[in-house]
Image (cartoon, helix red, strand yellow):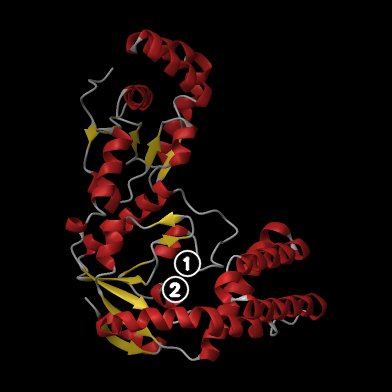
Amino acid sequence: MIDKNLYQTSDFKNIVINDIPLIDVRAPIEYEKGAFPNSINIPILNNEERHIIGICYKEKGNEEATKLGYNMISGKIKDERVSLWTSFIKANPTTVVYCFRGGSRSRIAQEWINEELEIDIKRILGGYKAFRNYLLDSLSKENQNYTPIVLTGYTGSGKTKLLKEVKNSIDLEGIANHRGSSFGSHVTSQPTQINFENTLAYDLIKKQNIGYKHLVFEDEGKNIGKNFIPQEFFNYFHSGNIVLLSSSLEERIENTLKEYVIESQGEYINIYGCENGLSEWFNYIYSSMERLKKRLGGDKFKKVIDELEFAYKNQLSTGNIDYHKYWIELFLKEYYDPLYKYSLEKVKNKIIFNGNYKDVKEYLNALK
């Protein structure tokens, strides 16, 4: 049995930069609330076992709870869990183990793994809690060692697509698995808030480690779907100068059609099948519009809804998606454009570059 103080690591930056594989031995209920990129949940205790041992800990203390744990996780159960850990480690030799505070669960797992493989697998000093605090600290203002640039433009101008082609960018919408608009939900769910923050921190640490002097962010509100951007970090990246992506109305309609109709319908069809998928997509778009009814006003809302319903029915009967362009154009002109015009007016003195897709892409990629 190894000394419990040996073979621990608190080199969190190395874990992030080198994408070190992690085994999270916490119970599934803990893992589901939040974990780290590159982690896999292979628990030493399942949810029920953790609950039972937790009661013992409260009533009789740590020593009795530990004894109970050893009795419960023994024989075939122990062998199965050790086998899962060792199989993963054989495929990922640099793996590090962690539990919540780096205490009993990860130490015991570490001991069992080392006995089985006769190697010195490491565990995280301070466990999940210490690593999580490190990642949260990386989002604080004093740890942002770059100049932020904010990419903005009218809805449908292609900001998200362009951002993916800029090497020194942070894709907040990608991390949040959301398109960042009133119709931005994907069929697949968003990450938990904890996982959103952890993945964002990973990306920031990696990009800063490369040495970029500028990082580019899309102009986002405080919330991206159900995820929210930590306030201090939000304030920092929004303090940057602005690059404006200008696109014609025709380009914006085509971009919106591709993203919110063609690609979005494809997601629903992949999950629900063709007929049900289109129906689910329509219901989602319709309900999203209803939430904006007050902002649009009754007459404008009715015009947009009428065009949406006509386009949808026409698509079902003919397969033609072109009629969707009419409600998209109405919605851009009547809802999104006034909002963007107002917000741009407030920050026009911070705009340092304005151009089309090609010119903006070249400008941003030329930044060091």
Sooner in the amino-acid sequence: mark 1 or mark 2: 2
Quadrant including the C terminus: bottom left
Residue 175 position in % (x across, y down): 42, 59
User: Residue at the location (70% across, 62% down)?
Assistant: 280
Q: Count residues near mark 1 (Cα–Cα under 10 Å), then give few for <14, some for 14-19, many for 20+.
A: many
Above or below for 2 versus 273:
above
Q: Count residues near mark 2 (Cα–Cα under 10 Å), then give few for <14, some for 14-19, many for 20+.
A: many
Above or below for 313 versus 66:
below
Task: Indicate which label's residue lies in the foreground, 1 or 2.
Answer: 1
Residues marked 1 and 2 touching at CB (< 8 Å): yes
Residue 333 position in % (x across, y down): 54, 85
Residue 83 in view, yes or no:
yes
Residue 183 position in % (x across, y down): 56, 68
User: Residue at the location (24% across, 52% down)?
Assistant: 138
Q: Which residue is more in the foreground, 301 or 257?
A: 301
Q: Which residue is more in the foreground, 99 or 96?
A: 99
Question: In the rendered image, which quarter is residue 212 located in?
Answer: bottom left
Question: What label does residue 180 carry, if any?
Answer: 1
Residue 123 in view, yes or no:
no
Q: Secondary structure at mark 2?
A: helix
Above or below for 162 versus 50:
below
Quadrant including the N terminus: top left
User: Residue at the location (28% across, 30% down)?
Assistant: 120
Kind of residue sitting beneath label 1? Gly
Residue 212 placement, left or right of 105 = left
Cα separation between marks 1 and 2: 10 Å
User: Residue at the location (69% across, 76% down)?
Assistant: 305
Residue 110 placement, left or right of 76 = left
Kind of residue sitting beneath label 2? Thr
Which residue bears the numbered disc 2?
160
